[in-house]
Image: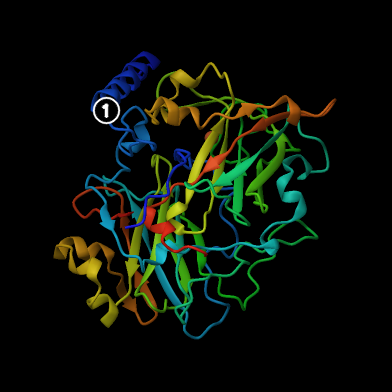
Amino acid sequence: MSRDPRTVLPTPSQTVGPFYGYALPFPGGPDIAPAGHPDTLTVHGHVYDGDGAPIPDAIVEIWQPGPDGDRSGAPGSLRRDPVTGGYAGRDGVTFTGFGRIATDADGHWAVRTLPPGGAPYLSVCVFARGLLHHLYTRIYLPGPATDADPLLAGLAPERRATLLATEDRPGVHRFDIRLQGAEETVFLDFR
Amino acid sequence: MTPTQQDISREIDGERQDYLAAGQVRHHPARDYAPYRSSALRHPLRPPVTVHDPEAVELSGPVFGVTDVTETDADLTLAHTGEPLGERITVTGRVLDRAGRPVRGQLVELWQANAAGRYAHLRDQHPAPLDPNFTGFGRCLTDDRGAYSFTTIKPGAYPWRNHDNAWRPAHIHFSLFGTAFTQRLVTQMYFPGDPLFAYDPILQSVTDDAARERLVATYDHDLSTPERSLGYRWDIVLDGPAATWIEEGR
Ligand SMILES: [Fe+3]
């Protein structure tokens, strides 16, 4: 065992609050797949609170490997226009592996991406007003690697189901995030 | 019935006593911190599932580069043709990991209210003026020392509806990335000596006194510039699992 190198104390988390909307979201945030890519996969869903009410002020962030399994990512998610100071948008070619989506007034979000390689899931980080510390979860996509996944295998069936995207139609998957309640999503803690 | 400040202050004190009695250091706020009413329906009731997998995708993370920022993104006073109202400030510091190593070339984002305490956001409708010369968001990449620096104005305190006569102390929201997705941090920086600290359930959700202190910037006179601006220093340490460190040399 290596010694725990964590010798410096961390800065505490605080809620993202309700007013990040003019700062964090960016055009192209949901478009991880290069424009027009034939393998584009859409994943969408709602974020719900403990009453089952949709949360209109949540942010869903996605991080994932490329289809080739490369986990090194690439810059350019937020590409800025040095002339106008606005967003130039993604370059339409580079796969950065990162997406950020604010839920709409109906608590709905959608990401367009490519299937991850080397792991059967998209990593998710959820922020919201009322949430003092973000939450991690995973969106597992249907397939043999998901069926063999050790994390999923260790969960009771009804808990496991909260991590499985369900196919609406070819290329479109649904994944709802429930912050609290009977069908509460499984959230993850990394050690 | 809307709780009073006295009700909330009593709850804040109760939470702090419970924390002290438990005798275990907790650096981050509990997600179920009742004095912050919005947390009631928005925190999981079940404990998180622990992941020990060294192959976890979350031990890597997104990267950003020169195309993701423009030079003026770090100066919030340049976003419009005129000068914003308020006290011009510099906020600078270093982003470190829990081993004290600099986090280099990563994205720092910041957003805030204007000098009157109003956000450039349609849902903020409290009767303080908008400033046509201030929007209030910026970003930069950390340098080789892990340092960031922003020029902005000091935000005002503002009211909110958590309870009767609820006011947030002046604060700047920050968003940070490390080299692993598990190091992700969204937090708020506060200004030293603010009389509203004790009344605010969001700041007080950090029940550990020393941890809460780490959310407060230091006034640094050497960072102030004559006739121009006041300087604040605030270092940020990203948390993360010990597993993050096994992959040396990344
Ligand atoms: Fe705020």
Point out residue B44 in the picture as x, y percentages from the top left corner: 27, 46
Specify how the rendered protein is coloured. Answer: rainbow
* Quarter where residue B204 is shown: top left
Point out residue B91 in the picture as x, y percentages from the top left corner: 67, 36
Residue placed farthest to the right in the image?
B227
Point out residue A60 in the picture as x, y percentages from the top left corner: 44, 57
- Quadrant of the rendered image holding ligand 1: top right
Q: A36 and B191: which one is in front? A: B191
- The answer to whether B101 is drawn above or below residue B121 in the figure is below
Residue placed farthest to the top in the image?
B6
- The answer to whether A89 is drawn above or below residue B206 in the figure is below
Seen at 66% across and 60% down, the residue is: B68
Q: Which amino acid does label 1 sit on?
A: Gly
Seen at 30% across and 43% down, the residue is: B43
Q: What chain letter is assigned to the residue under label 1?
A: B
CB at disc 1 and ligand 1 closer than 8 Å? no
Q: Is residue B203 visible from the viewing direction of this image? A: no
Residue placed farthest to the bottom in the image?
A38
Point out residue A102 in the picture as x, y percentages from the top left corner: 49, 55
Q: Mark 1 highlights which residue?
A: B23
